[in-house]
Image (tube, rainbow, N blue to C red):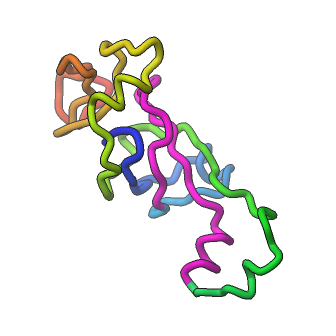
Amino acid sequence: MKEYDDVILTKDRQEYLDEGIKKGRIGYICEPEIRDNCFFVAFEDEELVKHREANDDEWFEGRGFDFDGDIPLLVRIEDLEFYEDGGTIDEQLLEALPKNNPKWWCKVENGYILNLLGEKKNKIPYDYNS
């Protein structure tokens, strides 16, 4: 998992529910760095998704932008599951990281939080607090 990848929320927590985001929702990672074992994930407004999936063109006519759009939320890595690759390569991640520092934790592969130097933050795969 890395910036612009699509992810699925796998657990309900009160802080997510307070924003109207429930288990099973798909979002995308919208910031490159990992902070406190969390990614910033953007979820689409549920009304927008519902009407788009129903091909409800009438709902969109004249509506402009009177829906919430993306709802950014800090989500724990352990509550996310990879869904679809966003195509971001390491060079793009480096460019987007604060001060272009390759030591920032910025992706998750095979259960490990990694930086661009290949260093692992956690010692036990999928135990992000180890």
Q: Which part of the image, by quadrant, shows the C terminus? A: top left
Total marks shown come to: 0
In the image, what residue occupies the spot 43% across and 31% down? 32
Q: Quadrant of residue 65?
A: bottom right
Q: In screen coordinates, is 19 left or right of 61?
A: left
In the image, what residue occupies the spot 63% across and 53% down? 70
Q: In screen coordinates, is 116 left or right of 42?
A: left
Q: In screen coordinates, is 103 left or right of 110?
A: right
Q: Position of residue 9 (x, y in %)?
A: 44, 54
| Residue 32 is one of the magenta-drawn residues | yes
Vertical order, 94 against 22 (above or below): above
Vertical order, 35 against 2 (above or below): above
Vertical order, 49 against 36 (above or below): below
Q: Position of residue 103 (x, y in %)?
A: 31, 13
| Residue 96 is one of the magenta-drawn residues | no
* Front-most of residues 24 and 62: 62
In the image, what residue occupies the spot 65% across and 70% down? 48
Q: Which part of the image, by quadrant, shows the N terminus? A: top left
Q: In screen coordinates, is 51 left or right of 12?
A: right
Q: Quadrant of residue 78?
A: top left
Q: Position of residue 126 (x, y in %)?
A: 23, 37
* Front-most of residues 84 and 25: 84
Q: Position of residue 118 (x, y in %)?
A: 17, 21
Q: Which stretch appears magenta?
A: 26-53
In the image, what residue occupies the spot 68% across and 71% down? 47
